[in-house]
């Protein structure tokens, strides 16, 4: 088969895979947002059937061979790289029997429904047996891959290529060595009173401030859609269509604001990938730590920073005058950056956040690398919170039920949150060398920030690795100390220690 025919066939293949993906995205987004409760089981069942059809198509021997032939025939290095990246996943997927794959997808759809109910009703027993089933079926699924070495290493590599327990252990050791003693020292200082941020904030008014966020962050209304869900997330439909959710907590002012800014970081990344990469793995296979670096950069280095609030605090204060009328700008900045060990990851302050991830990472290693009693996961969870953060959940909703990730079998995903935060600190350090970021934002020119991210990071998608991008942007390899140094410097100044 000549090169032109191979390319035409591959184009047809990519289009069909993209169409399947769009259908699945639509179902999953509806399940998490607008689908009525009684309709969810049917949607889950139809999604699993669709997953089976996708499975059959992408694993068809002729299609796999076509991609291999294109990889081996093309003289375009970027085309060869894209084929190799697609085959990387396919070589694993083709090893799974179709009936096992469909059964697994059905289980995950069921698991996520049960998790939602369990979380809302604080019912750990309702979800416990289902979680054990998901873990055991995940282990069984990975037996088909004939993995050399640790199953958990394999999982970590799926979410961020090149990562494994050795690298993450070294990274988290830096976190423990540098931040744990500092956090203990900080706990002995006078704490910041942030009570005004936990009053009564009607969802309708919070939604009004979301409209201000859209303008400040230069969100394109023709490409961005925002709605609500139990757990905020972002879904990528195309290079021109990113949708994400937030959740308004009427007793917590900053929760929805920071989650909206965070999720927009994910959306912005995809909207600024080179459009030529649409329907390729360069668009769909960006590492999760790289993705998280962009959401955490916006959430922390923008959403918790001085320039952003110099521009927006007057509007926030006007909307919630009863609660904020006596809160000065300087006091507000201290409040939103308060560091205090807490139970909920997505509500965690910037300093203690990586310890929430460390806890989940250590539990996942135990689940997949050790023979632990899965019936006691909730107790192990609580023990580690007490060990690292000095707090203990009083119920499952503020403990093991708080995240959706395990219900979806996203084992190996959590560590990317902390790694992405560290990437963000190093990227921001370089951006701030190139121009005064806070002054630029305070002047209402967020477009300059977007353009810098597009030029240096976003446009490449997955065509460059995280190591390559960090080296090219920062002029040096990844160094976790940019992250720990940034946090210690920021909070030393904030708490006068």
Image (tube, grey):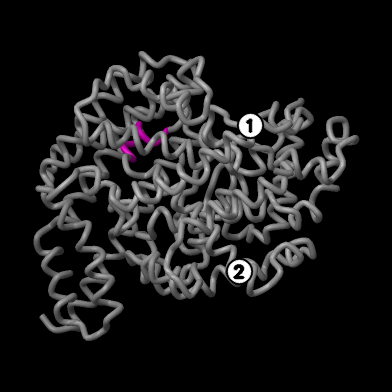
Give the mark, 1 or 2, whose residue is nearer the N terminus.
Answer: 1
Span shown in magenta = 404-410
Mark pair 1, 2: CA separation: 32 Å
Neighbor class of circle 2 (other Cα within 10 Å; few <14, some 14-19, many 20+) is: some
Q: Is residue 80 visible?
A: yes
| Residue tagged 1 | 187
**Where does the image place residue 194, in percent across and percent down from the top left?**
75, 32
Which label belongs to residue 125?
Answer: none
**Where does the image place residue 148, in percent across and percent down from the top left?**
12, 50
- Identify the residue at image location x=55%, y=38%: 352
Which label belongs to residue 431?
Answer: 2
Residue 209 relative to residue 39: left or right: right
Q: Is 388 located above or below residue 88 in the figure? A: above
- Identify the residue at image location x=21%, y=61%: 88
Q: Is residue 38 visible?
A: no
- 365 part of magenta stretch: no
């Amino acid at each position: 088969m000549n090169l032109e025919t191979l390319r035409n066939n591959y184009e047809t293949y990519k289009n069909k895979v993209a169409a399947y993906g769009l259908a699945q995205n639509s179902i999953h987004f509806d399940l998490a947002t607008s689908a009525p409760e009684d309709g969810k089981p049917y949607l889950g069942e139809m999604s699993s059937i669709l997953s089976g059809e996708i499975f059959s198509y992408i694993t068809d021997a002729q299609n796999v061979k076509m991609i291999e032939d294109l990889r081996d025939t093309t003289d375009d290095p970027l085309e060869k790289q894209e084929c190799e990246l697609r085959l990387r996943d396919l070589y694993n997927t083709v090893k799974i029997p179709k009936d096992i794959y469909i059964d697994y997808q059905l289980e995950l759809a069921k698991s996520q429904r049960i998790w939602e109910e369990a979380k809302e009703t604080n019912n750990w027993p309702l979800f416990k047996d289902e979680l054990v089933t998901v873990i055991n079926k995940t282990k069984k699924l990975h037996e088909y891959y004939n993995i050399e070495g640790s199953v958990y290493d394999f999982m970590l590599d799926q979410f961020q290529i090149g990562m494994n327990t050795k690298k993450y252990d070294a990274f988290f050791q830096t976190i423990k060595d540098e931040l744990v003693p500092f956090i203990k020292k900080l706990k002995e200082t006078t704490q910041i009173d942030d009570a005004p941020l936990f009053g009564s904030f009607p969802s309708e008014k919070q939604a009004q401030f979301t409209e201000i966020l859209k303008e400040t962050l230069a969100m394109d209304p023709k490409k961005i859609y925002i709605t609500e869900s139990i757990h905020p997330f972002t879904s990528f439909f195309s290079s021109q269509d990113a949708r994400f959710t937030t959740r308004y907590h009427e007793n917590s002012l900053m929760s929805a604001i920071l989650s909206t800014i965070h999720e927009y970081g994910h959306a912005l990344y995809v909207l600024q990938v080179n459009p030529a990469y649409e329907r390729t793995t360069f668009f769909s296979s960006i590492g999760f730590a790289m993705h998280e670096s962009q959401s955490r950069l916006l959430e922390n280095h923008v959403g918790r920073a001085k320039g952003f609030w110099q521009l927006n605090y007057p509007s926030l204060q006007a909307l919630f005058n009863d609660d904020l009328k006596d809160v000065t700008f300087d006091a507000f900045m201290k409040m939103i950056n308060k560091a205090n060990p807490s139970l909920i990851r997505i509500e965690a302050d910037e300093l203690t956040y990586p310890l929430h991830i460390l806890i989940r990472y250590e539990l996942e290693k135990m689940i997949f690398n050790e023979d632990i009693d899965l019936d006691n996961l909730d107790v192990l969870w609580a023990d580690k919170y007490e060990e690292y953060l000095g707090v203990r959940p009083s119920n499952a909703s503020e403990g093991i039920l708080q995240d959706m990730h395990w219900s979806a079998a996203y084992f190996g995903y959590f560590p990317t949150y902390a790694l992405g935060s560290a990437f963000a600190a190093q990227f921001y350090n370089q951006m701030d060398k190139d121009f005064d970021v806070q002054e630029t934002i305070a002047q209402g020119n967020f477009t300059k920030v977007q353009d810098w991210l597009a030029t240096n990071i976003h446009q490449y998608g997955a065509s460059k690795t995280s190591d390559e991008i960090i080296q090219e942007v920062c002029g040096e390899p990844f160094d976790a100390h940019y992250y720990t140094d940034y946090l210690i410097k920021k909070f030393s100044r904030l708490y006068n220690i």
